[in-house]
Image (cartoon, rainbow, N blue to C red):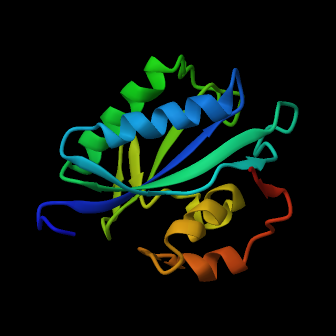
Amino acid sequence: MTDPGTRRAFVGLGGNLGDPRRQLESALGELAALASTRLVARSSLYRTAPWGVADQPAFVNAVAELESGLAPRELLHALLAIEQRHGRVRDGTRWGPRTLDLDLLACGDVQLAGAGLVLPHPELARRAFVLVPLAEIAPDFFVAGAGRVRDLLAAVDVGEVVRLD
């Protein structure tokens, strides 16, 4: 990183309503335009089976790596604003269909357990739809309290994660 006031942050992107590919590409552009933030890398897009609630369309997922001067909560609020611009309604339903989902996966080595934000993301180490694209761009990233991405990936079933052309 060039600025000591910045952090390496990873954002998981997903969606399965409307045109998910277009929505993820648009969201990636919006991430790149965030204040005090630079898009460093982005994964390919992946088609993935629904997680949690099986009776819904397949998802399209990706991961973005950012270098950001925003504090974790500021970054989270920016992600929620992007979701809202894409028609995301947060009504308390978990794991259901959505136009766009942006999850703050990790912010450097920050470990945080507060209301509305837990870092690193508590489910990161168990979700192939996050680990596959994350490993594409940052296989050696060490997830605080969990381990290296490549090692976490080796422990999950990746059979339903398909890279899109």
Q: Is residue 84 above or below residue 25?
A: above
* Residue 13 vertical position relative to residue 78 in the rendered view, above or below: below
Q: Quick one: 89 or 14, which is closer to the camera?
A: 14
Tell how many labels: 0
Q: Position of residue 23 (x, y in %)?
A: 58, 29
For this view, does 65 lie left or right of residue 89? left
The N terminus lies in quadrant: bottom left
In the rendered structure, the answer to whether residue 116 lies left or right of residue 1 reads right
Residue 134 place in picture, x, y as percent:
56, 64
Give the residue at x 46% y 40%.
Answer: 28
Q: Residue furthest left?
A: 4
- Residue at image coords 66%, 64%: 132
Position above or below: 132 against 129: below
Residue 145, above or below 104? below
- Residue 162: image x %, image y %? 80, 56
The residue drawn where x is 84% and y is 57% is 160
Residue 69, given in percent of the width and then of the height, sits at 18, 52
**Which residue is rendered at x = 27% and y = 38% of the image?**
34
Farthest front residue in view = 165
Q: Would residue 160 appear left or right of 132 to someone viewing this image?
A: right
